[in-house]
Amino acid sequence: MNEVSEILKDIHVELSRANKIHKPKFASLHEGYGIINEEFDELWDEIKRKEPVDMLIVEEATQLAAMCVKLIMFVKEESR
């Protein structure tokens, strides 16, 4: 499996995990934005650390990407 496929698989796994813990669909675009903003802040906090941990950056970026995918799915579903 190439690197991009592996990353996309990790994003899919994270989205599935998050959907089991939280609602599988955003209630609105505003909720989606808020969650994405929160995930971005968590990634940015890790990046700003004096000694950032690569695996934590990857984890936070994966969570952010999963929420972006969730927002895309929400928009596509709402436009049908």
Image (cartoon, rainbow, N blue to C red):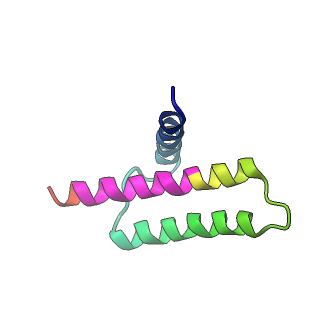
Q: Residue at x 37, y 60 (%)?
A: 26
Viewer-proximal residue among 29 and 57: 57
Q: Residue at x 31, y 53 (%)?
A: 73
Q: Is residue 30 left or right of residue 44?
A: left
Instruction: Looking at this view, name the residue that lies furthest to the left.
Output: 80
Q: Is residue 62 left or right of residue 78?
A: right
Viewer-proximal residue among 26 and 39: 39
Q: Which residues, given as a range, are shown in magenta?
A: 62-76
Instruction: Looking at this view, name the residue that lies furthest to the right.
Output: 50
Residue 1 drawn at (x, y percent): 51, 25
Residue 31: image quadrant is bottom left
Is residue 43 on the magenta stretch?
Answer: no
Residue 75 drawn at (x, y percent): 27, 60
Q: Magenta: predominant secondary structure element?
A: helix
Viewer-proximal residue among 2 and 13: 2
Instruction: Looking at this view, name the residue that lies furthest to the top.
Output: 1
Reply above or below: 66 against 71.
above
Q: Is residue 71 left or right of residue 80?
A: right
Locate the C terminus and report the quarter of the image it occupies: bottom left
Reply above or below: 2 against 35.
above
Q: Is residue 23 left or right of residue 7?
A: left
Q: Residue at x 79, y 59 (%)?
A: 52
Residue 66 drawn at (x, y percent): 48, 51
Reply above or below: 15 against 44.
above
